[in-house]
Image (cartoon, grey):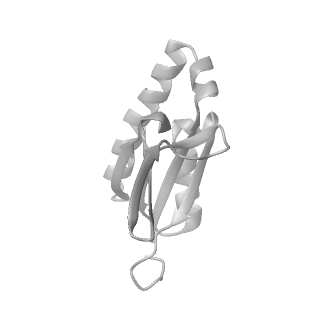
């Protein structure tokens, strides 16, 4: 089954880290990615910029509007993800726990659906 391991970040938490602690997080990603590539579970990964760089797009009555940033009332935002293909939700949770950010904030594990609405 395919899962998206979504990394949520709280900018206040990240900013409170020392440079050595930040480097340890990045090094943790550098160590994690090859492990899941070697196991054959890796599909893809991406880091996202801070939400201040984003646009929110809406189409209403055929009119497109794009506004700055998301309208969210939370301090946590989607900072990146790993897409994996593994045997079970339990294994996906094991993989999520290996992501260094799990010690700082939250990793959401969600099954990916195919076009028919079934989990892949």
Q: Residue furthest bottom?
A: 116
Total number of numbered discs in the rendering = 0
| Quarter residue 115 falls in | bottom left
| Quarter residue 29 falls in | top left
Left-right relation of 7 to 26: right
- Residues 97 and 117: in front is 117
Q: Position of residue 40 (x, y in %)?
A: 33, 59
Q: Residue at x 47, y 63 (%)?
A: 3
Q: Residue furthest top?
A: 19
Q: Position of residue 70 (x, y in %)?
A: 53, 46
Q: 42 above or below 113?
A: above
Q: 69 above or below 89?
A: above
Q: Position of residue 68 (x, y in %)?
A: 46, 41
- Please identify the quadrant where the N terminus is shown: bottom left
Q: 83 above or below 49?
A: below
- Residues 12 and 68: in front is 68
Q: Residue furthest right?
A: 73
Q: Residue at x 46, y 32 (%)?
A: 28
Q: Position of residue 54 (x, y in %)?
A: 42, 42
- Residues 38 and 48: in front is 48
Left-right relation of 101 to 36: right
Q: Residue at x 54, y 63 (%)?
A: 110
- Please identify the quadrant where the C terminus is shown: bottom left
Q: 105 above or below 94?
A: above
- Residues 61 and 30: in front is 61
């Amino acid at each position: 089954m395919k899962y998206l391991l979504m990394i949520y970040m709280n900018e206040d938490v990240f900013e409170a880290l020392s440079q050595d602690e930040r480097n340890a997080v990045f090094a943790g990603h550098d160590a994690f990615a090859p492990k899941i590539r070697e196991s054959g579970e890796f599909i893809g990964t991406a880091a996202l910029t801070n939400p201040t760089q984003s646009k929110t797009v809406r189409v209403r009555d055929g009119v497109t509007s794009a506004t700055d940033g998301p309208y969210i009332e939370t301090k946590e935002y989607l900072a990146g993800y790993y897409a994996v293909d593994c045997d079970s939700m339990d294994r996906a949770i094991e993989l999520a726990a290996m992501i260094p950010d799990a010690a700082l904030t939250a990793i959401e594990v969600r099954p990916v659906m195919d076009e028919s609405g079934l989990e892949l």
